[in-house]
Image (tube, rainbow, N blue to C red):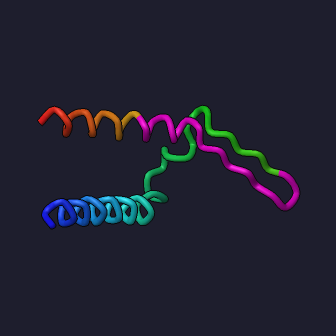
Amino acid sequence: MQGLGWALVVLGAVILVTGLVIVAGPRIPILGHLPGDIVIQRDNVTIFIPLGTMLVVSIVVSVILAVIGRR
């Protein structure tokens, strides 16, 4: 049962962080406007592909996990 408890704690932390990003995301002005982010606008359709933002977020998460994994 201890493994299930830790899995629930981790799942709760992931949900918490996801919620904070969703709430605070629009307040971070640089996210979504980095070089490499692709925006295609047509008459009634807008397609947004955040390649630069995904790269930065991936690097930050990788560094955080590497620091946590060393402990």
**In this rendering, position of residue 22 left or right of residue 60:** right
Height in image: 20 above or below 32?
below
Q: Give the range drawn in magenta.
A: 42-58
Q: Where is residue 69 in the image (x, y as percent from the top left)?
A: 20, 36
Magenta highlight on residue 56 = yes
Height in image: 70 above or below 39?
above
Q: Quadrant of residue 24?
A: bottom left
**In this rendering, position of residue 22 left or right of residue 14:** right
Quadrant of the image containing the N terminus: bottom left
Pick whichever, 3 or 57, lies toward us.
3
Q: Which residue is drawn at 25% across and 59% down?
A: 10
Q: In which quarter of the image is residue 36?
A: top right
Q: Position of residue 28 (x, y in %)?
A: 44, 52
Q: What number of labels is visible?
A: 0
Quadrant of the image containing the C terminus: top left
Height in image: 46 above or below 49?
below
Q: Which residue is drawn at 68% across and 49% down?
A: 48
Q: Residue at x 33, y 59 (%)?
A: 14
Q: Which residue is drawn at 27% across and 39% down?
A: 65
**In this rendering, position of residue 61 left or right of residue 3:** right
Pick whichever, 48 or 30, lies toward us.
48
**In this rendering, position of residue 8 left or right of residue 28:** left
